[in-house]
Image (spheres, helix red, strand yellow):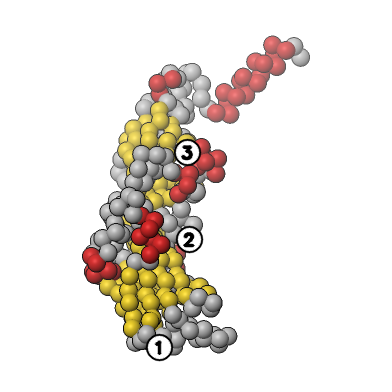
């Protein structure tokens, strides 16, 4: 077969396989992309430092979810997401970052206030120890009718925002309980708002998280670190230290009162670490912000 015949056959095969030919453009699509961006509380791009996984949801003009997918690793690393083939029309794109142990429910409701994401354990009614370090982004997107011109292709920036607070609790002066199971105190965060909807608003009935703890016997230090959703009212949330096998708190910290007494912790920021230090000393219990945290934020504060 001549070379020209081979080229003609390959060209024809390519046209048939994509169903995109000059006489009928119905199955032809422009290239639509998203530039993924998160700058936190500054002006420098920190998306690669904070977000390693992205779930993308595409809704049509009637708020029907027409596509959902986990972005390929290379697209996340390059911060450039390729939208699926879409017919001309108006869409809304929503992305959720770092949903490792997070589940989305309500996609069929066509109501962004009823589409929510929360910990998988919460939906399964199991013990919840915290949330992923979640981020959210949303944008409208108009897909143009394909004409074959370069201007059909477009890229929009998807700006992420934080959907979580980072919480660290350290308890100092906890005696070693030995090897007995359940011999150490436990930590709970009570009154937490468990869900966030597809408008990035917290929602759901308040619940309690049982934190996973680590113990350093040489320092008599009990520590827990987790993420919680960005609740609206700090006064509704409290941290409880419970004795081993008991239900009456050894110490209880109202988060609203704690933050009011320690304005160095700024919960208006995108990146927030709430550090709480509970210390047993000479028969007294003190609650404070750890000194290391104050030294860390002083230059900016």
Q: Where residue 199 sits in the image (x, y, percent)? A: 29, 51
CB atoms of marks 2 and 3 within 8 Å: no
> In this orientation, which residue lies closer to the viewer: 26 or 259?
259
Marks 1/2: CA distance?
29 Å
Q: Are marks 3 and 1 in contact (CB under 8 Å)?
A: no
Residue at 66% over, 19% down: 9
Residue 163 shows in this picture: no
- Label disc, if present, on residue 185 of the rendered structure: none
Residue picked out by circle 1: 246
Residue in the foreground of this view, choosing between 203 and 159? 159
Residue 101 numbered tag: 2
For the N terminus, the quadrant is top right
Q: Residue at x 35, y 43 (%)?
A: 42
Marks 1 & 2, CB-CB < 8 Å contact: no
Q: Nearer the viewer, mark 2 or mark 3?
A: 3
Q: Which mark is residue 79?
A: 3
- Secondary structure beneath dot 3 equals loop
Q: Residue 88, position in %: x, y?
A: 37, 31
- Identify the residue at image location x=42%, y=75%: 171
**Image location (x, y in percent) of residue 33:** 44, 33
Disc number lying in front (3 or 1): 1
Mark 1 closeness class: few <14, some 14–19, many ≥20 residues within 10 Å = few
Q: Secondary structure at mark 1?
A: loop
Spatial CA distance of label 3 from label 1 is 49 Å
Crowd tier of the residue under label 2, counting other residues whose Cα lies within 10 Å: few below 14, some 14–19, many 20 or above: few
Q: CA distance from mark 2 to mark 3?
A: 22 Å
Decide if residue 63 is in sight here: yes
Question: x%, y% of residue 54?
Answer: 46, 47
Q: Is residue 294 above or below residue 160?
A: below
| In front of the other: 222 or 279 | 279
Residue 105 vertical position relative to residue 154 in the rendered view, above or below: below
């Amino acid at each position: 077969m001549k070379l020209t015949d081979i080229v003609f056959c390959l060209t024809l095969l390519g046209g048939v396989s994509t169903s995109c030919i000059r006489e009928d453009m119905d199955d032809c699509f422009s290239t639509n992309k998203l530039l993924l961006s998160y700058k936190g509380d500054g002006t420098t791009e920190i998306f690669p430092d904070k977000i390693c996984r992205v779930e993308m949801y595409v809704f049509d003009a009637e708020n029907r979810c027409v596509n959902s997918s986990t972005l390929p690793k290379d697209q996340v690393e390059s911060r450039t997401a390729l939208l699926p083939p879409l017919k001309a029309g108006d869409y809304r794109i929503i992305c959720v970052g770092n949903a490792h142990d997070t589940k989305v429910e309500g996609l069929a409701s066509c109501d962004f206030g009823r589409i929510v994401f929360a910990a998988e354990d919460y939906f399964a009614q199991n013990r919840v120890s915290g949330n992923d370090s979640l981020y959210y982004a949303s944008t409208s997107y108009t897909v143009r009718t394909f004409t074959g011109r370069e201007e059909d292709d477009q890229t929009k920036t998807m700006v992420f925002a934080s959907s979580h607070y980072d919480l660290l609790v350290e308890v100092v002066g906890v005696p070693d309980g030995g090897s007995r199971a359940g011999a150490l105190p436990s930590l709970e965060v009570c009154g937490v708002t468990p869900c966030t909807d597809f408008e990035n608003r917290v929602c759901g009935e308040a619940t309690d998280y049982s934190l996973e703890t680590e113990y350093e016997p040489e320092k008599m230090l009990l520590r827990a670190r987790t993420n919680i959703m960005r609740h609206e009212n700090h006064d509704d949330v409290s941290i409880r230290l419970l004795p081993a096998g008991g239900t009456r708190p050894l110490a209880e910290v109202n988060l609203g009162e704690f933050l009011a007494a320690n304005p160095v912790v700024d919960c208006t920021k995108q990146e927030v670490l709430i550090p709480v230090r509970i210390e047993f000393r000479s028969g007294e219990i003190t609650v404070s912000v750890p000194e290391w945290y104050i030294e860390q934020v002083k230059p900016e504060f």
